[in-house]
Image (spheres, grey):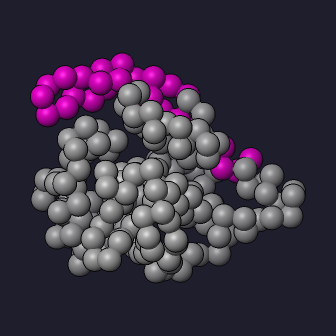
Amino acid sequence: MSEARSYPRHVKTDAGDIEFRLMSRADEATVLDFARALPPHDLLFLPRNISEPKVLVAWINEIERGAITSLLAVKGRQVVGCGTLVRDPHSWSPHVGEIRMVVSEDVRGQGVGRALSQETFALALGAGLEKLTVQMTVDQRGAIALFESLGFRAEGLLRDQVRDVDGRTHDIVVFGHDVARFQAQLEAYGVPGAVE
């Protein structure tokens, strides 16, 4: 298991300086503003509609309980992205974590999503997880390309899995990444801290 990561962390992107910090209850209003500014289709990345205040409160409760770790990508005072690592140590799959991520439209294509996904991946390594999953609708090609470039591979297709606000159903593709194998390869090459 890697050392625990410390926050805040700063990353230079084409969108400018981005601060990564852990989400807390104090972020509720700014995260709600971020979520409500997202296109409705982007919310299908997530199992719940985070633009609803009651869902956001439940999310923060899960962070405080320790079931979820959420990183905010902040530019200036504005949240421009959120990466979440979800794990359930009491389930049949305590070795598996799920990444949930969404990035503001105005910083897409500028390295923010890549930096956020790498940072979230590094959190998974630090947590000792052996496998990661991520899911998205099949038409979210930019996100699919991003996660494939990080070594995730398609493992399943769930037909008509989510319903958007207009009542249309969408297929979800599930990607997986063998974190344990990746970590072993890093250590074999003598670069265990490559993602730090």
Magenta segment includes 173 = yes
Location of the C terminus (image quadrant): bottom right
Q: What residue is rendered at 24% in x and 22% in y?
A: 169
User: Quick one: which residue is furthest to the top in this view?
Assistant: 159
Residue 132 visible, this angle: yes
Q: What residue is rendered at 36% in x and 51% in y?
A: 102
Using residue 7 as the reference point, say whether residue 70 is left or right of it: left
Relative image position of residue 143 (x, y in whole percent):
45, 41
Residue nearest the viewer, comparing 182 with 150: 150
- Quarter occupied by residue 86: bottom left
Residue nearest the viewer, comparing 111 with 143: 111
- Quarter occupied by residue 162: top left
Residue nearest the viewer, comparing 162 with 166: 166
Range shown magenta: 155-181
Using residue 161 as the reference point, say whether residue 15 is left or right of it: right
Relative image position of residue 112 (x, y in whole percent):
45, 59
User: Is 180 located above or below residue 165 in the figure?
Assistant: below
- Quarter occupied by residue 147: top right
User: Is 186 located above or below residue 49 in the figure?
Assistant: below
User: Is 68 located above or below residue 166 in the figure?
Assistant: below
Q: What residue is rendered at 16% in x and 70% in y?
A: 29
Residue 86 visible, this angle: no
Q: Would you say the magenta stretch is mainly helix, strand or loop?
A: strand
